[in-house]
Image (cartoon, rainbow, N blue to C red):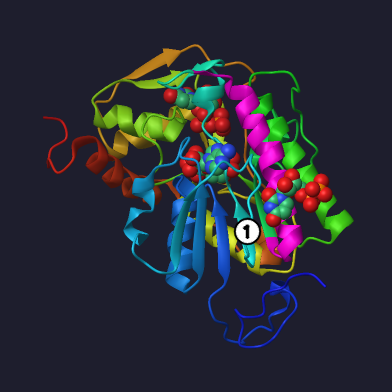
Amino acid sequence: TPTINTRSYDVAVHSVGKIPLGIKRKGLRIVVTGGAGFVGSHLVDRLIARGDSVIVVDNFFTGRKENVMHHFGNPNFELIRHDVVEPLLLEVDQIYHLACPASPVHYKFNPYFNGIGILNWGSLVHKTNVVGTLNMLGLAKRVGARFLLTSTSEVYGDPLQHPQKETYWGNVNPIGVRSCYDEGKRTAETLTMDYHRGAGVEVRIARIFNTYGPRMCLDDGRVVSNFVAQALRKEALTVYGDGKQTRSFQYVSDLVEGLMRLMEGEHVGPFNLGNPGEFTMLELAKVVQETIDPEAKIEYRPNTEDDPHKRKPDISRAKELLGWEPKVDLRKGLPLMVSDFRLRIFGDQKDGAT
Ligand code: NAD
Ligand code: UDP
Ligand code: UDP
């Protein structure tokens, strides 16, 4: 018999997926890998607020202790410094598997100097996606936990279908600078489905589209964090290429709601989780100017290799099967991120410009 935890429920059930709706449950034991990162830390906040016990597993490559420090001392919270590439033994009910260096800045400069030594960033990202995901699936299998993979819209590559539906197989370069990330996530999806079909593990797959919000790394090179930090520091906004490429930007609270609905729901997915509001990079720069500094200048830079030309989620599947759709549009979400960035860049000074 699989080791299944029934302690967590008022009713004895043999799978977290089979809790009858409306039955009040006690807290679950949940692992969030990558929980000290941007998305993970917001997810942890919601799970803790719901009354669950949360174990964050993070090696702090791109995450920060500061993101979860407010839970220190809470008996429902644990933080383990651990690289998911190494095996890990825990007893839990659910695994949210987010651990993966997600920022593009690193793999675009491969090999990458991290301040201590030269890292082969590509192999590190790929290993995390493949071996890390395998380990967490092995853990899920051993303890009968439900496993959620945070995959990415990058599995669609430079898409030939627009907007992208989950049924689209993608247009991905297997040997390019981004391949460690997008091919890595594609393999992670494959492993997830293999463990589902072959070992009966309960799995969920989310394909996340560009997400922004408080606690994003200030200098991780993603476009929203770059533009916001640049505008606050009175630097020019760096637009890559002609700025006509598009992305669709989702506020982090919408994503966290989607991830939790997906985990608790009955459907494996994959599900696109993103905001269909599509912007060119020049339009995004304009929104940042309007929000922070209308005088902010724009500076054009050469674009990076294999940059997808457009990206926009078709979210009909998530709407229909998860009852989910994003609520916070860019003009509403951006100011919430700006106040966090202002505080982190300038501390308590009221006027960041001086
Ligand atoms: P992030 O870099 O802020 O968080 C990732 C976390 O994983 C960090 O805390 C990092 O230290 C940790 N980590 C990395 N490698 C690890 C390893 N080997 N072992 C243990 N911990 C490790 O990024 P994020 O934006 O919060 O992304 C979270 C997840 O969502 C990632 O899997 C990412 O691929 C996915 N995603 C994010 C976006 C987005 O726009 N933010 C879009 C698509 C997919
Ligand atoms: N694993 C882990 N924690 C566990 C169970 C497994 O980290 O609680 C790792 C294990 O070390 C292995 C991977 O998950 O590398 C896959 O495990 P599985 O049992 O599916 O595969 P096997 O070990 O049989 O190849
Ligand atoms: N980009 C930009 N200026 C920047 C950083 C990024 O114009 O300072 C562009 C980048 O070329 C891409 C888009 O913004 O077309 C989104 O880039 P990001 O790295 O944020 O996300 P991803 O490419 O992974 O979707």
286 lies left or right of 93: left
Give amino acid for label 1: Ile
Residue 60 lies within the magenta run: no
28 lies left or right of 318: left
The residue pinned by badge 1 equals: 95
Residue 244 visible in the snapshot: no
> Could you tell me which quadrant the C terminus lies in?
top left
The region drawn magenta spans 118-146
Q: Position of residue 245 (x, y in %)?
A: 56, 26
- Residue under the point 66% across and 46% down: 87
128 lies left or right of 344: right
Q: Is residue 307 above or below residue 166?
A: above
Q: Nearer the viewer, residue 44 or 65?
A: 65
- Residue under the point 19% across and 36% down: 346
Q: Is residue 230 above or below residue 88?
A: above
Q: Position of residue 187 (x, y in %)?
A: 76, 38
User: Few, some or many C-alpha atoms within 10 Å of disc 1 (few <14, some 14-19, many ≥20)?
Assistant: many
Q: Position of residue 164 (x, y in %)?
A: 71, 41
Secondary structure, magenta segment, majority class: helix
